[in-house]
Image (spheres, helix red, strand yellow):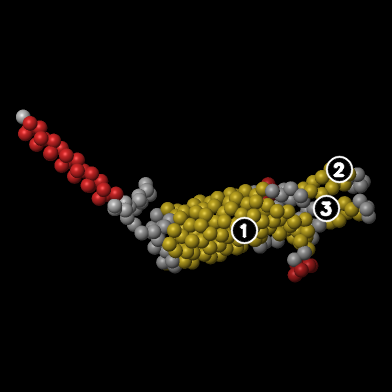
Amino acid sequence: MKKHIMKTTAIVLFILMAQVSSLFAQSNETPEFRTLFDTNKPVKISGFGGPVIEFSSVGNNELGVSVGGGGAVLVDNLFFGGYGMGLATYHYSDLKTFDPINGIWVDHSSERINFGHGGFWLGGLINPADAVHFAVSTKVGWGSLSLFDEKYMGQHYNYFTDNVFVLNPQVEVEMNMARWLKINVGVGYRLVTGANKTYDYYDDNGNFGGTRKYFNSKDYCSPEASISFIFGWFW
């Protein structure tokens, strides 16, 4: 009986020692850290850039065309970068201000509207290897609205400059023309906020009538469509 107990004890001790040795062996190995997002595929990094043409409503519901461009780093199907846009078409102010000191009206109708903005460009591609595929993007930027007299355009003399914030989400269709060229057509909505500078308004008799804004942000909030020619290297 004693021999049987001693034999069983020896076996248990042997198993325990083997397990402890195994634990020590594992503790000396450096484990590979994993996350839920681990894949066996290597990360692909590339880049692209190109011109952008945008069609929207500006001012008094007039069709405006903005031109600019952007560039981004492409990591797998996601991209991040920067952009810049400026109003290219001619739009004029209907603003008239009253000079109470000299008692005269100042007509600003010959002064052209200047609207530009730039900032971050973020987005993602859906099945980008397909010849025709979808994409989504958002431009988040800052810029300004102002007036300038075309006679002094070379001097870049702007009036009534007001800073604005711009948010422009889009849904897009991309067409792969070559490994290095895509044509992108998008539709979205441009949200503009922050135009709040005011001037003192006087009626025809020179009586003070309160304050009015030089620009209304809502006049530049608009559905928009764009076309882009994107150059880079795509897989």
How busy is the neighbourhood of tag 1: few (under 14 within 10 Å), some, or many (20 plus)? many
Residue 91 in view of the camera: no
Instruction: Provide residue 180's location: percent of width, then percent of height.
Output: 44, 67
Quadrant including the N terminus: top left
In this rendering, is residue 81 above or below 191?
below
Find residue 118 and name its label.
1
**Disc 2 and disc 1: Cα gap in Å?**
36 Å
Q: 14 or 140: nearer the eye?
A: 14
Find residue 96 and name its label.
3
How busy is the neighbourhood of tag 3: few (under 14 within 10 Å), some, or many (20 plus)? some
Q: Earlier in the sequence, mark 3 or mark 1?
A: 3
Query: Tag 2's secondary structure?
Result: strand
**Disc 3 and disc 1: Cα gap in Å?**
29 Å
Kindly identify the amino acid type of the residue bearing the numbered disc 3.
Lys
Which of label 3 and label 2 is nearer to you?
Answer: 2
Instruction: Provide residue 129's location: percent of width, then percent of height.
Output: 38, 59
What residue is at 23 percent from the left and 44 percent from the top? 20
- Residue linked to disc 2: 209
Instruction: Provide residue 49's location: percent of width, then percent of height.
Output: 52, 64
Q: Earlier in the sequence, mark 3 or mark 2?
A: 3
What residue is at 34 percent from the left and 57 percent from the top? 41
Q: Quadrant of residue 18?
A: top left
**For residue 181, side relative to residue 60 (left or right):** left
Find residue 11 and name its label.
none
Instruction: Provide residue 145's location: percent of width, then percent of height.
Output: 71, 55
Badges 3 and 1: C-beta atoms under 8 Å apart? no
**For residue 119, side relative to residue 8 (left or right):** right
